[in-house]
Image (tube, rainbow, N blue to C red):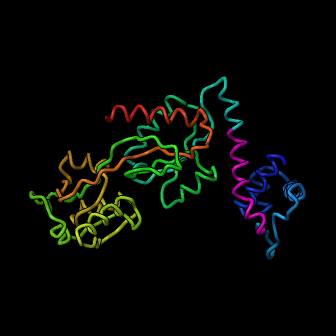
Amino acid sequence: MHPRQIQSLLKVVELGSVNRAAEELYLAPSSISAQLKELSSILGVELFETVGRGIVLSPAGRELLPMLQQFHSLVEDIHQQAQTITTEPSGVLKLFAPSSMCIYRLPSLIERLQALAPQLEIHLTHEPFDYQRALLQAEIDAAIVVNESVSAEWQAHQWHREEVVYVCHPKRHQEQVLSLDQLLEQPIITTEAGCTYRVRAEQHFKANGLVLKPRQAFANVEVIKRCLFANMGVGLLPLCVVADDVAEGRLKVQAVQGTPYPFSSWLIYPKNRHVLPKLQVLVELVRGDKLSDQ
């Protein structure tokens, strides 16, 4: 089995066409077809089947795809490790982070990362995205997540302490600490269902015999902030998202009984993953930030 065969297969799967894959890889379509045929012969199974004028993965191909992706990622890691034995970290570092972290935490981290490793290219993905599957299949190197704790299946490095708060326009703000019943009198704006911030708030309401019923829900924290600037309700957001707006008086944190909700941001990756220099430099920066955050 040759890495070029795996690369060709993955490119055909990605683009859905031998001809398009050939253009992308600067090869003749006949070369791509020959590589796929050789790979099928080596593995002893048909990897593709014809559908109309195109080809799609066979059931055997779909079953083998995650391992073939891992094989391809491992080959890239070996090349990058070899290149960094005598040089600084290089290659592509693929990361996932929720939009709040992408906008308000990662820019300064990436700036320092690129100063330390200027040959490193950062590819950043945010939600909606199945980062856990992508981590296990080596499609990304690491993920930044925000949660109260992290599953034991991951190697985890705590980054920042994060507080999730209720926040609103100054004209809507009330000086007293609101009960959850009083908060429900306000139009509440949250992140999407299933988001860790919202799940924590739902648990808080449930523990007090109430149900959180948002008036609006958005996946993007910037949309929530725009609604708050327009005085459309009380929003549930990480404090880091609104810290500048609160400091400059554009928004105010609304005190609510049982809040703020304590969270942490974490850098995670599979425990069995070999940590390449490109990831190690990020780990060291995260560790340094944690120490300064204490």
Q: Which residue of the protein is positioned furthest toward the bottom in this rendering?
A: 52
The quarter of the displayed image where residue 287 is located: top left
When the figure is inspected, residue 65 is found, relative to residue 262, above or below; the finding is below
The quarter of the displayed image where residue 56 is located: bottom right
Q: Which of 33 and 25 is in front in this view?
A: 33
Q: Is there any visible trace of residue 61 in the rendered image?
A: yes
Q: Give the range drawn in magenta.
A: 58-77
Residue 25 at x, y = what percent? 77, 50
Residue 125 at x, y = what percent? 52, 52
Q: Who's the residue at 28% across and 70% down the image? A: 212
Q: Nearer the viewer, residue 105 or 28?
A: 105
Residue 54 horizontal side relative to residue 112, left or right: right
Residue 235 forms part of the magenta stretch: no
Residue 7 at x, y = what percent? 76, 51
Residue 59 forms part of the magenta stretch: yes
Q: Which residue of the protein is positioned furthest toward the left in this rendering?
A: 176
Q: Quadrant of the C terminus?
A: top left
For the stretch drawn in magenta, the main secondary structure is helix
Q: Who's the residue at 54% across and 55% down the image? A: 132
